Structure formats: C-alpha cells, structure tokens
Amino acid sequence: MHKIAVFASGSGSNFEAIVTACEKHQIDAEVVLMVCDKPQAKVVERAANHHVPAFAFSPKDYPSKADFEREIVTRLQEAGVELICLAGYMRIVGDTLLEAYGGRIINIHPALLPSFPGAHGIRDAFEYGVKVFGVTIHQVDATLDGGKIIAQRGFEYYGRDIDELEQKIHAVEHILYVETINKLLK
Ligand code: GAR
C-alpha cells in the first residue's frame, strides 16, 4: 500500500474525495498526512473525521518559508510519504520541498492550463466568457500552476450561474484526481 500526503488550505473537498477513495480501496494508498497552512480551515476538521494525522501550521510562526518547509519535509519523511497531492494548497512550493520531493508533487487546478492560472481559475475563466471549462492535474515546479501537465478534462458550459459551474468543476476534480493518483501509483 502506497503512502500519500494531501496539502490543502481551505474546504478540502478534494482531500475528502481522495481519502474516501483510499478508504474504499479504489486507490491502493493510505493518506498518512494532511498538511494545512490555515489551522482554522475546514479541511482540518475533515482530516480529524477520517483519523488522518494532520500538520496544521501558521506560516507567520516561522521565520521563513524554508523553515516551515523543513518541518514539513521532516514530517513527510517520518510518515514515509511517496507522493504529495496538492489540493487547494494556496502557496507556491519552495526549494526545500522541491529538493526533497521534486517530481513527486502534483497539483490540481480548476481550469484548463495554461489558461487561467492562479488563485481564481474558475472566476477568471467565467468572467472571460469561455465556453469550455475544465480541470488540470500537473507536476509541481517552482512556477505558479506551471509544471508538466499529467491529465486534463474539459466540458462545455453555456450557463450563467457561477455557483453551478463551480459545483460541476469540483465534481470533475474529485473523479479526475482519484483516477490520476491511481494511474501514477500503478
Ligand atoms: C480546488 O478547486 C482546486 O482546484 C483549487 O482550489 C480548490 C480547493 O477546493 N486550486 C487552485 O486554484 C490552485 N491554483 P477544495 O478545498 O474543496 O478541495
């Protein structure tokens, strides 16, 4: 059984989808660590509900990014993590993490990259007026949403309801992330 970590900063619906898939043996892996840079985020509660060990920290408690990333790397190594899945972790990964886990970190983004990178992919695509939306899973490097693309799934949407669109995107994310993790671990 593989050991994976999920990093998140917010609600954690992708975390929930990944953990649930592991629990149902749809992925041959266990989420051995959830890392969160916002101790009040809902994902922390979700991790507790699923008995997943969590490292929730405030970046401001550390002198620099390298300092909190060193602590993260120690915890990842102690837990024997093989693959890191960023799921709404709203932070650029720094050199310390990349040096330790480069090539083994993936991210999910709620748009068809390279269009609409950044923190507001859904809103940016909606406001631009595109009609094909989608989700990208890519390798993580030092750029913002810029690493090599691993998987993408798109769909047409002509509606005008951004909440409905967001729900559709999340539904695609949850399926595509589980499928992609499975493929990478095989
Ligand atoms: C997801 O839509 C994910 O694609 C996005 O944050 C959301 C987290 O939702 N990530 C990015 O925008 C990365 N640039 P969740 O907390 O419910 O999983």
Image: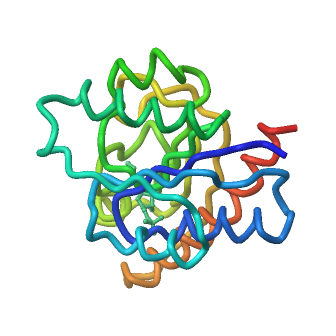
User: Which residue is depicted at the point 28% across and 63% down?
Assistant: 39
Identify the residue at the far top of this view: 99
Measuring from the top left, give residue 143's x and y in whole percent: 35, 26
- Which percent across, then down, holds residue 105? 55, 33
The image quadrant of residue 44 is bottom left
Q: Image point 34% across, 56% down: which residue?
A: 56
Pick the residue in front: 66 or 172: 66
Residue 60 falls left or right of residue 121: left
Q: Residue 153 appears in which quarter of the rendering?
A: bottom right
Left or right of 126 on screen, residue 62? left
Q: Residue furthest front?
A: 78
Residue 138 in sight in this render: no
Compared with residue 185, is residue 161 higher up or lower down, i.e. above or below? below
The percent position of residue 96, horizontal first and vertical second, equals 37, 20
Q: Residue at x 50, y 73 (%)?
A: 48
Q: Which residue is drawn at 73% across and 54% down?
A: 30
Decide if residue 47 is on the left or right side of residue 31. left
Q: Nearer the viewer, residue 132 or 49?
A: 49
Front one among 13 and 43: 43
User: Where's ligand 1: which quadrant?
Assistant: bottom left
Residue 16 visible in the picture:
yes
Quick check: 98 left or right of 64? right
Scheme of image coloration:
rainbow
Looking at the picture, tell me which residue is in the foreground, 26 or 65: 65
- Percent position (x, y) of residue 154? 62, 57
Q: How many labels does the image show?
A: 0
180 shown above or below 162: above
